[in-house]
Image: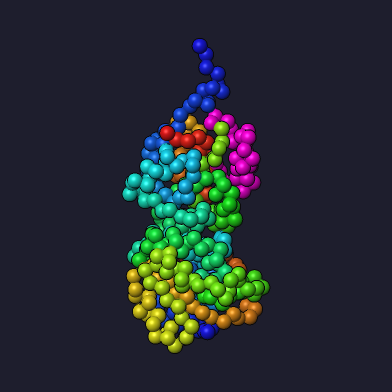
Amino acid sequence: MMKRDDCLKALARHVTDADIVLPVYSTAFDWITIRPHPLNYLSHGAMGLASSHGLGLALGRPDKRIIVLDGDGSLLMNLGTLVTIGEVAPPNLYHFVCENGTYEANGGHPIPGRTNVDFAGFARSAGYRAVHAFTDLKIFEQQIGAVLAEPGPVFVDLKIVATGPQERDYSRIHGPHVRKAFREALAAG
Amino acid sequence: MQVSAETARETATLAGGGIIAAIKESGIDYVVSVPDITTSEGLLRPLAKTTKPRLIRVCKEDEGIGICAGLAYTGKRALLLIQHTGLLDSINAVRGVAVEYALPICMMVGLLEKEPGVPPRQSKRYGVRIVEPVLEAMGIPYHEIETDADIGKIKPAIDDAYAGSHPVVMLVGRRPS
């Protein structure tokens, strides 16, 4: 099992200034510390919708890589998104799920089916072009560059340990200044 | 023989081709949809045969809210074509994405089993009666699309949503031909 921030640091080394990244909840707070950038798309409006926003961005900006950093609880709220993305098959969409088996931002309660659910299996059967699962940080660090070079849609299941309480200032995610910065950065290129 | 106003409303027509033409004139690039029986034959089936706008089939309506939001940031116009049950199911996404983030989420919503010619608030269907009050409570502008005379509302409604960056709902009250 891996630590989320270690995975995100490894990923950040391969994310370029042109990429759009959509992290959710706990991952978002880690990510904006590791990689603060106006092309972080942080305001998703309702739990579970990050990958749907990502699909819209992927369709509208085929010139950019769209990297969704989902949570397992979030993805369970919108499993149909896997089927939709599989059918639309945007080649520029990279869908990660940080699987820690808990609703970490809502008290750390276990997700339903935490010992049974196979997110990679869901994505594979939904039609993603490539599906990966990682439990070892060193292997993830070795392979992430190649994964991000594959044509999408790509699904990556990161098996991580749950972390403890986290300081969360939600204005850093939902504040209007965040969306304004994103809009301006996207319009600029 | 005189025809009563009520009979005239009940027998009025709504041309699906006219609605589709208005959608195209509004510059809609994508139609995102969960099938709805009111609009199935007159709108969704012919739209599925065109490449512009491109049809994206989704599994659930709130997915569509997210997709339309992402497209809006890229400057692409989208229309979410759904049933009023799906709208009600998606209220939290509409609240967060469309209203609180002030995004131009344009929704065309079939009113399942609404009686032709009957105003939505006077329908015998509870689910239909509550749609407009719910939209008013959320501060979302809406337009009734009941007869051919209403088709002219579509393009201005969509243009206004994008110009002012706010959601809009168009309520389709009978099956388009």
Q: Is residue A40 covered in magenta?
A: no
From the top left corner, tell me how far across and down residue A51 is, in percent: 48, 64
Vertical placement of residue A8 versus A68, above or below: below
Where the C terminus of chain B falls, by quadrant? top left
* Quarter-of-image position of residue B47: top left
- Range of residues picked out in magenta: B116-145
Total numbered badges shown on the rendered structure: 0
Given the current orientation, which residue lies at the most extreme top position?
Answer: B1
Q: Is residue B28 visible?
A: yes
Given the current orientation, which residue lies at the most extreme bottom position?
Answer: A138
Given the current orientation, which residue lies at the most extreme front position?
Answer: A116
From the top left corner, tell me how far across and down residue A91 is, in percent: 35, 66
Q: Is residue B99 visible?
A: no
From the top left corner, tell me how far across and down residue A107 is, in percent: 66, 73
From the top left corner, tell me how far across and down residue B145 is, in percent: 50, 36
* Of the pair B10 and A13, the residue shown nearer to us: B10
* Of the pair B113 and B151, the residue shown nearer to us: B113
Here the colouring is rainbow
At x 52% / y 45%, what residue is drawn? B83
Query: Viewed as shown, does residue A146 lie left or right of A172?
Result: left
Vertical placement of residue B159 versus A10, above or below: above
Q: Is residue B140 covered in magenta?
A: yes
Query: Viewed as shown, does residue A91 lie left or right of A116?
Result: left
At x 33% / y 46%, what residue is drawn? B50
At x 52% / y 13%, what residue is drawn? B2
Vertical placement of residue A107 versus A86, above or below: below
* Quarter-of-image position of residue A187: bottom left
Vertical placement of residue B51 versus A15, above or below: above
At x 59% / y 49%, what residue is drawn? B88
